[in-house]
Image (cartoon, rainbow, N blue to C red):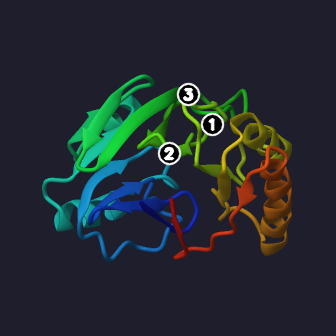
Amino acid sequence: MRLTKLEHAALVIEDSGDRLFIDPGNYTTPITDATGAVAVVITHEHADHWSPEQLRRIVDANPDVRLFGPAGVATAASEFPIETVAAGDEVEVGPFRLRFFGGRHAEIHSSIPIIDNVGVIVNEAFAYAGDSFVVPEGVAVDVLAAPAGAPWMKISESMEYVRAVAPKRAFATHEMVLSQFGKELSHARLAWAVEQSGGEYVRLEPGDTLDF
């Protein structure tokens, strides 16, 4: 499989010519090449993880694409045929086996309601928890997408999350809210965390790829 990082929380995984899009939101450059998409996973309803414009581009290019998200996404994106998923659900689409975990967004503040959020494991190799620190169970994670910065986290929490998952490789996601100085700090801290269990930190910029 080949992973391509896009800006912020978005990424694409390719296998056998088919493509899986995850969290194409409004902090991500407009997606102009969506050919071959068989599925889209939206972890939760926040606009930095999906937008009608991004989703429409993917659907228009691939009328049979399947769209997955928790109940909150199905409500927010009611103009699209979202298939509702929750923690424990498993789906196979093309070459991709998707296993969902988690269930709730991390707390931003006590005044802000906590919404639905699902993480996804792809082919028992890649894991991404969306906006949460839920550790995926029953899998030896090859590649982990680790959050670098957000109003719902401290970098120490992401470091401890990486240590708990102990992946072979990790890269930073959710970084568009950071300055360049902040990104550099997060890269260094996340690199330290993954190296504690013998893993490798892979620094990916938007457009960079990783084979796994």
Specify whether 49 is left or right of 155: left
Alpha-carbon neighbours of circle 1 within 10 Å: few (<14), some, or many (≥20)? many
Q: Quadrant of residue 69?
A: top left
Q: Name the residue under label 3.
A: 104
Secondary element at image label 3: strand
| Residue that extends furthest to the left in the rendered view of this protein | 63
Front position among marks 2 and 3 = 2
Tag 3: amino acid: Arg
Please tell me whether residue 121 is drawn above or below residue 5 in the rendered image: above
The disc, 2 or 1, on the residue closer to the chain's N-terminal end is 2
Specify whether 191 is left or right of 111: right
Nearer to us in this view, 8 or 88: 88
Tag of residue 125? 2
The disc, 3 or 1, on the residue closer to the chain's N-terminal end is 3
Q: Mark 1 points at which residue?
A: 132
Secondary element at image label 2: loop
